[in-house]
Image: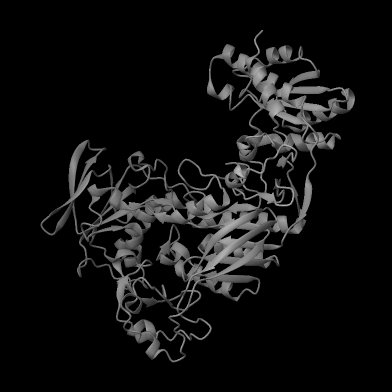
Amino acid sequence: MAEIRIGVYVCHCGTNIAGVVDVLKVVEEIKKMKNVVVCRNYLYMCSDPGQELIKKDIREYNLNRVVVASCSPRMHEITFRKAIKEAGLNPYLLEMANIREQDSWVTEDKEEATKKAISLVRIAVLRASLLEELYEKEVKVIKRALVIGGGISGIQASLDIAEAGYEVYLVEKEPSIGGHMAQLEKTFPTLDCAACILTPKMVEVSQNPNIKLMTYCEIEDISGFVGNFKVKIKKKAKYVSWEKCISCLLCQEKCPKKVPSEFEGSVGFRKAIYIPFAQAVPNKPVIDSESCIYFQTGRCRVCEKICPTKAINFDDKEEYEEVDFGAIVIATGYDEFDPRLKPEFGYGRYKEVLTGLEFERILNAGGPTFGEIKINGKVPKSIVFIHCVGSRDEMVGNPYCSRVCCMYIAKQAYLVKERLPDCKITVFYIDVRAFGKGFEEFYTRVKDSGVIYRRGSPSEIYKRGDKLIVRSEDTILGEMVEEEADLVVLGTGLVPRKETLELAKKLKLSLSPDNFLLEAHPKLRPIDSNIDGVYLCGCCQGPKDIPDSVAQAKGAASSVIALFNKGVVTVEPIQAYVREEYCSGCHICEGLCPYLALEFDKEKKVMRVNTALCRGCGVCPSACPSGAIVMRHYTDEQIEVQIGGLLWKE
């Protein structure tokens, strides 16, 4: 066996590490260790000079292992692997010690921090001596993309990928694409017509030959890895043949059953057979079997009788289609916070209390009131808007800011003032976050129009006669106030969709503490997920406005295009393998594998690892009762020597 020659490099990271850890002392202690040929410190190891220092030492001292003590491997492991590879060393002969996030950032005690740093670097050196060369495999990329979610983010990502010449499947669970943007009247701060911006893009999606539009569909199952995902798509039963349908709307007009419309919120209704909204793409109806009289009672079938093209098919069944994809873009959007979780505001109890999105439909020219502002058949003389309903509120589990609420309330207040100049408009706010381009100027314009802003967070809403009373403290005046209103609009925040959480389970995606999908790195990789080949855009990753959603969609599309242009991907070799002589074929590992990567060889009666599916999570080797499964790069010996190093005392 060749002599082990280790180079150790301790980073100052400016003052991030060196401000707490005595870096020079760490270097002096580690120099004494067996197999350590050279040990250095440098201000920024990730910098070009820092990397060149490592490369130079590999060549000069014939190093065959490298240890870098710096920040999290999540941040720079790829950087240092690339550096040692350029110097002729196998990239998996690198070990990192995290002395920033796990040490200097969690204490101000310099003595204890230095001791811990020495300990962390010591066990990294011990493990490095047992590292083995591993080799990546190249796999061809299937040049077809899946975009999940048909809001503005999904639409933009699909169009950009398709324009680059690649095939795209756009899957949307609703009967039409458009998402929440299709519900809006105007967009802030420019007051552009939302439909005027969105509708041409929706039509462009339907006409693009590279985009296969799959509305009223859901993702049933996903397996595989970057470049080679296998996806099972469920096509829900529509009970209408879209090939035969001519969108005459006779069925919708004659249908006798009315139910609340999901698109209109609580302020509008639809029929049991319906097209969600006038500009829907595709502009074809579906039958809601849960509200259809025929499906509930066996009677009616009016739509079938009057359909001129015989497009109604009550025997329609859901179908499944399996398709292979090279990359996945998740653009599943958000849900509006349910104000019933804040019962003090009376939502659901008083018809005069609406959410922001419901009021948007009242303002919309295509909404249930055709843009006429009326509540209970009357034009309101006073309206109160309340900020931060379901945002910045730890009591409901949402401590984050939803980012769009301040501005959409300002927009709605301004639109009301334009249409009802004599209406008294009061906005209760905690503080106003007008962070975007042109936002502060628009906020000033709204205040100048006569909208009253009162600083305070309302505690309750109750009725006095036919008026709503909003009770709050005015924190500027330092007194309790009661504001009368004919209508109260709650500035509801943005929360993760339930469907997104289900999708995260299927793909094994990480979630941030607020339950939105977690990006690979908040600054350097804000579009990548923790799964290679799966990209995030729009509000599935966190609350954001339309421009930011579109920008992120374009970024996700560019990542997909770059992957497809490359044509091949390298599969990381950190995977499990089975030592057949020890395997008893007990199947315990098979049931635990979250990626279905374990298969039973009936002939040899042992388990095998499908390397195309294994992602190196480590579940199977930890569960194997006979120790037959070994995780490459994380062997029992490597972990045991680290534990021994932690227990070592001077």
Relative horizontal placement of residue 442, taking residue 205 as reference (left or right): left
Which residue is pictured at 30% across the width and 53% down the height? 490
Q: Is residue 452 above or below residue 184?
A: above
Residue 409 in picture, x, y percent from top left:
35, 54
Q: Is residue 180 above or below residue 631?
A: below
Q: Is residue 252 above or below residue 178?
A: below
Relative horizontal placement of residue 491, taking residue 621 as reference (left or right): left
The quarter of the picture where residue 91 lies is top right
Q: Is residue 157 visible?
A: no
The quarter of the picture where residue 254 lies is bottom left
Residue 561 in picture, x, y percent from top left:
69, 58
In this picture the colour scheme is one colour
Q: Quadrant of the N terminus?
A: top right
Q: Please give the count of numbered marks on the rendered protein.
A: 0
Q: Is residue 389 visible?
A: yes
Q: Nearer the viewer, residue 34 or 478?
A: 34
Q: Quadrant of the C terminus?
A: top right
Which residue is pictured at 62% across the width and 52% down the height? 534
Q: Is residue 469 above or below residue 217?
A: above
Relative horizontal placement of residue 310, taking residue 59 as reference (left or right): left
Q: Residue furthest left?
A: 465
Q: Nearer the viewer, residue 46 or 266?
A: 266
The quarter of the picture where residue 335 lies is bottom left
Residue 524 in picture, x, y percent from top left:
63, 42
Residue 206 in picture, x, y percent from top left:
57, 74
Q: Residue furthest top?
A: 650
Q: Nearer the viewer, residue 200 or 328?
A: 328
Which residue is pictured at 29% across the width and 81% down the height? 256
